[in-house]
Image (cartoon, grey):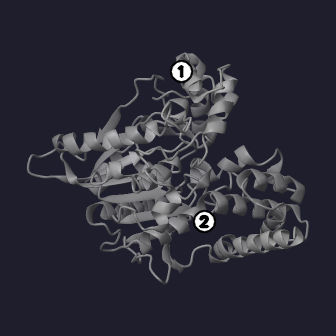
Amino acid sequence: MCLQDPKIAVDLAKNISMELDIPGISEDCLYLNIYTPAVPKADIKLPVMVWIHGGGLALGAASFFDGSALAAYQDVVVVLIQYRLGIMGFFSTGDEHCPGNYGLLDQVTALHWVQENIHSFGGDPGLVTIFGESAGGVSVSLQLLSPLSSGLFHRAIAESGTAMMDALIHTDPLPIAQHVADAFGCDITSTKAIAECMKQLPEEDIINSFEKVQLFHLGVVMDGLFLTKPRDEIFQNHEVNTVPFMTGVTNLECGWLLAHLLAPPGWVDGLDREQVAPILSRLNPKVPDPRLNELILDEYLGTTGDRIANRDGCLELMGDLFFNIPAIQAAKFHRDAGAPVYLYEFQQAPSFIQSKRASFAKADHGDEIHFVFGGCFWDGHIKFIGNGDICTKEEEKLALTVMEYWGNFARTGSPNGEGLVEWPQYGEKEEYLGLGLKQTVGRRLKDKHFAFMTQTVPEKARALQQEKERSEL
């Protein structure tokens, strides 16, 4: 797998009760795994589903997933790709010396490979769906904005991550590049010096650098090649690829795994408002006036001081800022550009994982992957750590249902099919599908907080700015 700290990968696997052999680490990592439902027949061409893994653009590998169940149950060819990560994939000085986005260019190269070779595995190069989760979902969403990937795929699914996530999109990468280069003792007086020094780093130093330089801070930039315009300009001008688009979130994205990374020790038992404030400041660093963060805290925590309510409000706030609001914004942009859009909220935590979490945790970040790939039916190189059956009968049924929705989307551009609850297209009514043990149609996902964060807060920001300007006269 591509350069990363393998210890972190092992710990992450344990946290989600997964056991697998971690592959070797190498710069020579641009490989892919292909799963077909049977020996391909020359006269049959199947839909192709290309998976882009997540991991904050710093972790992950194709071997962390098993495409066999999805391929077999849905009669599709599943391709799991890899791309350069961390420093190797996303370090950028913001100019010609180190333009960045190398990991995204690797994804484009993989899509070209699929176009040229997937027929040999029974796949139809004219029917390719890209899908991914977290940073993989962000990658999928970004491929819809790039001229380089136009025509290389025909549907797109972004799970718990879209290009509207500010956390992985950088408008000014140079300060981050200087911070990283300085940590390695490089001369940071010029971008040329930075680039030359970073290119000489030993592989071992890069592997061991994860915590040292906080590689999650590296991200996507406007490089003039993969992204030729600012993200917001592309969205606002409706210049996105208008292939059918599916996106969605879990019903508590930051309820467990990410909360352990972002919240202070002891957060499970409750939080004080003073503990939540610095979390918000980190997640919302560009706020023009600190009074806006106080307004946001009032909205999510209330003013009672109840530590459990504060904890729950904090988890919801983190999920909204990171995932929920960006997903809804992306759905609206693609809808308004003329693309068929399908929005979901995933609502079922895998029972074998949930038993190891606190009772307040719901469907957490990444939980839907277990069902999308039919993890209930895996019998290969990945094992799940648990007592008894991995899935209940109801969960097995949900896995079959989710795979069918995803497979239908890959085949036709619509998730709907015989025997399934009708999934409405995201339109003026803003309908979405709740994906739980039972599937239900809802309207205006997270509408109260979405309106607050995208209307109330900006209006308050303008009012505070006007107040400041008047006071300076």
Seen as rendered, the residue at the extreme bottom is 429
Q: Is residue 9 visible?
A: yes
Find disc 1 in the rendering and name its residue. Answer: 196
Locate the C terminus by quadrant.
bottom right
Q: Which of the two labelled residues, at mark 1 and mark 2, occupies the earlier sequence position?
A: 1
- Classify residue 180 as left or right of residue 228: right
Identify the disc placed on residue 3. Answer: none
Q: Badge 1 local density, few (<14 within 10 Å), some, or many (20+)?
A: some
Amino acid type assigned to the residue bearing label 1 in the image: Glu
Tags 1 and 2 touching, CB below 8 Å: no
- Classify residue 63 as left or right of residue 322: left
Give how far across and how far down residue 183 sits, in percent: 69, 25
Amino acid type assigned to the residue bearing label 2 in the image: Ile
Up the image or down, 332 lies above or below 321; here it is below
Seen as rendered, the residue at the extreme left is 43
Locate the N terminus by quadrant.
top left
Identify the disc placed on residue 325. Answer: 2
